[in-house]
């Protein structure tokens, strides 16, 4: 069931004391947006960067501490080569263009995923921007690139297993904190609000461990059409929900 998006929420209506500390977004619908307009998919991806910029700026203005964007999944490598190449070139150009904005807004850039599979040019640009923004502390913007949650969890199991085998960790001491320490997101808190655009209602192998208690928000808006207003609507809906974490309403109140 999709959430209503008719009522527009003013930023002044949001409760600044109940903001999610970590928002994650599955940015879906670039290709369909382009197709609807009779354009090639690459144009959709290019227009999607405008929504990224607007969303990042809006989160920073609100005081959101962490924003994670699903930019490229491990499964996306199976897309047509031309589209993949276009996405990689767009990523490099976007990083170059946005570094000034990141610095001006005191935003730290981070990246998660199997980064070694990215083209060397992408990795270099990514590393440069991450290095130059590492001391920024207003908000952490994390790009999930060549990311797959199952691969992340598999790598975590392997790493912990090796440490158990070498007597670095005992099986009795393995708990959630140990697992968190071995995830790509080891420096990030759990996701509070997960947003997916375009009408699809799937998680698509994104942050499966980290969204265990996240509030899910699905909207039919295609990503290139996603604006600050849509972000406010999602946060407003989040603030209406009762987050019980397994407890009863009476215990929460």
Image (tube, helix red, strand yellow):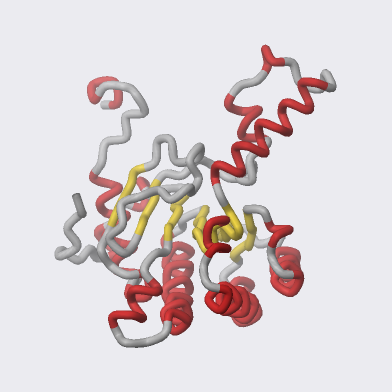
Q: Is residue 162 left or right of residue 37?
A: right
Check the image and name the residue furthest to the top.
172
Q: Residue at x 58, y 26 (%)?
A: 176
Q: Nearer the viewer, residue 179 or 20?
A: 179
Instruction: Please identify the quadrant where the C terminus is shown.
Output: top left
The spot of residue 123 in percent (x, y) is 73, 67
- Residue 247 drawn at (x, y percent): 32, 22
Residue name at image x 37 percent, y 87 percent: 39
Q: Does 156 appear above or below 226? A: above
Q: Is residue 52 visible?
A: yes
Residue at screen point 80% across, 21% down: 165
Q: Is residue 96 above or below residue 116?
A: below
Figure quadrant of residue 219: bottom left
**Which image quadrant is residue 233 in?**
bottom left
Residue 192, given in percent of the width and then of the height, sits at: 41, 44
Of residue 17 and residue 39, the one placed in the foreground of this image is 39
Of all residues, the one furthest to the bottom in this rendering is 38
* Count of marks placed on residues: 0
Compared with 253, 64 (above or below) is below
Left or right, 226 with reference to 65 = left
Residue at 40% x, 73% y: name it.
30
Q: Position of residue 15 (x, y in %)?
A: 31, 51
Q: In this rendering, would 86 be left or right of 164? A: left
Q: Is residue 138 visible?
A: no
Quick check: 7 left or right of 203? left
């Amino acid at each position: 069931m999709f959430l209503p998006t008719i009522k527009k929420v003013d930023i002044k209506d949001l409760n600044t004391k109940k903001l999610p500390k970590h928002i994650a977004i599955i940015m879906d619908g670039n290709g369909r947006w382009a197709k609807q307009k009779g354009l090639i998919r690459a144009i959709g991806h290019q227009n999607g960067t405008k929504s990224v910029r607007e969303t990042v700026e809006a989160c920073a203005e609100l005081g959101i501490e962490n924003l994670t964007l699903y930019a490229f999944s491990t499964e996306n490598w199976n897309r047509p080569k031309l589209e993949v190449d276009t996405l990689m070139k767009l990523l490099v150009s976007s990083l170059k263009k946005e570094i000034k904005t990141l610095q001006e807004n005191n935003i730290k850039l981070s990246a998660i995923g199997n980064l070694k599979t990215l083209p060397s040019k992408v990795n270099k640009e990514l590393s440069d921007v991450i290095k130059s923004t590492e001391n920024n502390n207003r908000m952490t913007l994390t790009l999930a690139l060549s990311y797959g949650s199952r691969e992340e969890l598999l790598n975590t199991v392997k790493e912990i297993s090796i440490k158990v085998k070498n007597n670095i960790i005992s099986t009795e001491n393995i708990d959630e904190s140990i697992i968190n320490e071995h995830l790509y997101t080891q420096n990030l808190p759990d996701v509070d609000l997960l947003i997916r655009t375009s009408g699809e209602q799937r998680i698509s192998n994104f942050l499966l461990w980290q969204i265990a208690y996240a509030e899910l928000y699905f909207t039919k808006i295609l990503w290139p059409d996603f604006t600050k207003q849509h972000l406010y609507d999602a946060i407003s809906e989040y603030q209406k929900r009762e987050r019980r974490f397994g407890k009863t309403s009476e215990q929460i109140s």
